[in-house]
Amino acid sequence: MSPEWARIFGAVALPYVGGFLGARITGNKDSANMKWYKELKKVPWNPPSWVFGPVWTYLYGTMGYASYLVWRDGGGFEGAVVPLGMYGASLALNWLWTPLFFKYHLKGWATIEILMYLGVTGATAYLFWPVNQTASKLLFPLLGWISLASTLTIGVLVKNKDKQS
């Protein structure tokens, strides 16, 4: 594998690390976390559970590749420290939501966190734009999905405020 392909692979693979850990936290359909989730009242536009895996698989790949494009065109970490630092913050917030919501059932904190994730990801797309417009545009579907996920999280919070856990 050439060094360039290794960089692409590493950048694309990185988001999947958190996705894999998140999937382990969430568990399969028979896990306690999924049973808890199934019992929650949800908004009518909540997608079926099977949609989340394929969507996140696509989004993790595009966000990883976008980060590679910014790294490449921005002159590495030193040349693109601000946009890549913002991307790192976005990735950390992405990874944090799952344990807050599914493991600890902290609906209020998960709501605050996902809104922060939306803002930081918007800032990431903005900072990617001058470095590589394609990289910025690759984050647009992610922004749309986080927007939807934010409404789902807010909906769970509002519709289940009587449920502690």
Image (cartoon, grey):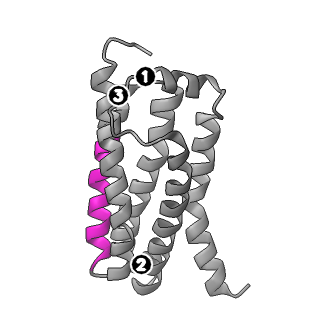
- Left or right for 97, reference 144: right
Residue 26: which quarter of the image?
top right
Residue 17: which quarter of the image?
bottom right
Q: Secondary structure at mark 3?
A: helix
Of the pair 135 and 149, the residue shown nearer to us: 149
Q: Secondary structure at mark 2?
A: helix
Q: Which residues are magenta?
A: 114-129
Q: Amino acid at mark 3?
A: Val
Mark 3 and mark 2 residues within 8 Å of each other at the beta carbon: no
State how far apart marks 3 and 2 are (Cα): 35 Å
State how far apart marks 2 and 1 are (Cα): 40 Å
Q: Residue furthest right?
A: 1
Of the pair 59 and 123, the residue shown nearer to us: 59
Per the image, the residue denoted by label 1 is 40
User: N-terminal of the two: label 3 or label 2?
Assistant: 2
Query: Where does the N terminus fall, quadrant-wise?
Result: bottom right
Task: Residue 143 in the image: state x and y as whole percent.
Answer: 32, 58
Task: Residue 14 in the image: state x and y as whole percent.
Answer: 58, 62
Q: Which mark is residue 70?
A: 2
What secondary structure characterizes most of the magenta part?
Answer: helix
Q: Label 2 crowding class (10 Å Cα cut-off): few <14, some 14-19, many 20+?
A: many
Q: Which mark is residue 52?
A: none
Task: Residue 112 in the image: state x and y as whole percent.
Answer: 29, 36
- Left or right for 142, reference 95: left
- Left or right for 102, reference 133: right
Q: Residue at x 45, y 31 (%)?
A: 101
State how far apart marks 3 and 1 are (Cα): 7 Å
Q: Residue at x 46, y 66 (%)?
A: 63
Q: Label 1 crowding class (10 Å Cα cut-off): few <14, some 14-19, many 20+?
A: some
Per the image, the residue denoted by label 3 is 156
Query: Where does the C terminus fall, quadrant-wise?
Result: top left
Mark 3 and mark 1 residues within 8 Å of each other at the beta carbon: yes
